[in-house]
Image (spheres, rainbow, N blue to C red):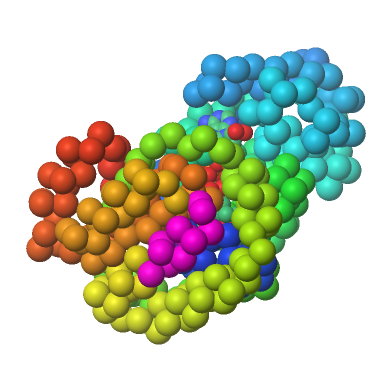
């Protein structure tokens, strides 16, 4: 069986959303793929193809794994192991046989596009279907969120819920609303470029914990929340882009941007309607709202910077 799962971009509100403030996020068609097959042993074999890592463990040990105590060299397995553990426990499965799971992905790892949430949601769907107990979206999303929270210590529902329900979501107080109607139509008319700028030195968990230590963070979060409120009422690209850039300026104040991210965001401002980092920051990806009249110049400028451009669409 094969399970394909999207990734996401946060259009507004990352970090602030962890503390209950608003965010807007969108599922995109850069996907991860999980292949799961039966093996006739009471074992789980995990193969992370992109990371060139594999692991074999007894089924019996999986259900009470302590994720925070995992060996350092197993850290890349944290999300999928935690997802397997929580799914088996939630479904109360006492499996007679195990499986081999192969994970591969088009999503750049640890770049702000929710690769962890995509792997988590994909694993939950794959394992529950494999044992013939497929879960509803509400269950997948909730289990996924609990995995991200367990692995990271702190998390919002943004990534896992967006990736489970797809489309465009507004998140507030860790609750979500699917965005439909005129704002969805407006966003569908927008062309976004995702630009992979540089490798991230820190994982999401570390960046979220770094922001947690900022004393005046709530003042910044409130300003971000006002931007999200304004963005949700916007129906023209100039204003939407300007608000994206304003959000980026506030993310800079949270110390989650880098000089290279700022440089590429600046190019996005000059040749597009606006730009910002997306996800936890500290490197990774930015998102640019394209001004079609200047798109060729934008691409030309970006190509001088040794970055990778992804053309993605919303995934419903
Ligand atoms: N292709 C992949 N194969 C296996 N695990 C992956 C893959 N992509 C992401 N992961 C998991 O997600 C982690 C990165 O998550 P995170 O730091 O939250 O970044 P992101 O912004 O991409 O979600 C990796 O350390 C690994 O555990
Ligand atoms: C920083 C945060 O708002 C988004 C993190 O996204 P990503 O893992 O960088 O794709 C954390 C969260 O919402 O759980
Ligand atoms: Mg993540």
Identity of the residue drawn at 29% across and 37% down: 308
Quarter of the image for residue 243 reads bottom left
Residue 224, percent from left and from top: 50, 72
Q: Does the magenta stretch include residue 227?
A: no
Quarter of the image for residue 139 reads bottom right
Is residue 104 or residue 238 the one in the foreground? 238
Identity of the residue drawn at 16% across and 46% down: 301
Residue 179, percent from left and from top: 48, 74
Relative height, residue 148 to residue 219 (above, below): above
Quarter occupied by the C terminus: bottom left
Relative height, residue 160 to residue 236 (above, below): above
Left or right side of 24 for 188: left
Relative height, residue 157 to residue 194 (above, below): below
Identity of the residue drawn at 37% across and 58% down: 276
Identity of the residue drawn at 68% across and 56% down: 213
Is residue 301 or residue 90 the one in the foreground? 301
Residue 163, percent from left and from top: 55, 53
Main SS of the magenta segment? helix
Q: Residues in magenta?
A: 246-256
Q: Is residue 249 magenta?
A: yes
């Amino acid at each position: 069986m094969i399970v394909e799962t999207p990734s996401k971009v946060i259009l507004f509100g990352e970090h602030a959303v962890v503390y209950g403030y608003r965010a807007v996020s969108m599922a995109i068609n850069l996907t991860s793929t999980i292949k799961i097959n039966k093996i006739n042993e009471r074992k789980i074999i995990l193969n992370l193809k992109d990371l060139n890592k594999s692991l074999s463990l007894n089924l019996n040990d999986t259900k009470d794994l302590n994720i925070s105590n995992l060996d350092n060299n197993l850290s890349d397995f944290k999300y999928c192991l935690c997802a397997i553990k929580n799914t088996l426990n939630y479904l109360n499965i006492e499996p007679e046989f195990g499986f081999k799971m192969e994970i591969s992905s088009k999503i750049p790892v640890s770049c702000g596009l929710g690769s962890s949430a995509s792997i988590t949601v994909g694993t939950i769907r794959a394992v529950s279907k494999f044992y013939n107990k497929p879960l509803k979206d509400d269950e997948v999303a909730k289990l996924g969120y609990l995995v991200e929270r367990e692995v990271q210590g702190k998390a919002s529902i943004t990534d896992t819920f967006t990736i489970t329900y797809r489309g465009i979501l507004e998140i507030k107080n860790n609750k979500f609303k699917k965005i439909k109607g005129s704002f969805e139509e407006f966003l569908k008319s927008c062309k976004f470029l995702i630009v992979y700028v540089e490798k991230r030195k820190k994982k999401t968990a570390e960046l979220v914990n770094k922001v947690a230590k900022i004393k005046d963070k709530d003042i910044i979060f409130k300003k971000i929340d006002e931007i999200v409120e304004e963005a949700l009422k916007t129906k023209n690209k100039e204003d939407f882009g300007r608000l994206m850039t304003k959000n980026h300026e506030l993310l800079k104040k949270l110390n989650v941007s880098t000089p290279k991210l700022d440089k590429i965001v600046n190019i996005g401002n000059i040749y597009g309607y606006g730009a910002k980092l997306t996800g936890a920051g500290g490197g990774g990806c930015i998102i640019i709202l394209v001004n079609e009249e200047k798109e060729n110049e934008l691409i030309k400028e970006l190509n001088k910077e040794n970055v990778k451009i992804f053309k993605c669409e919303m995934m419903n």
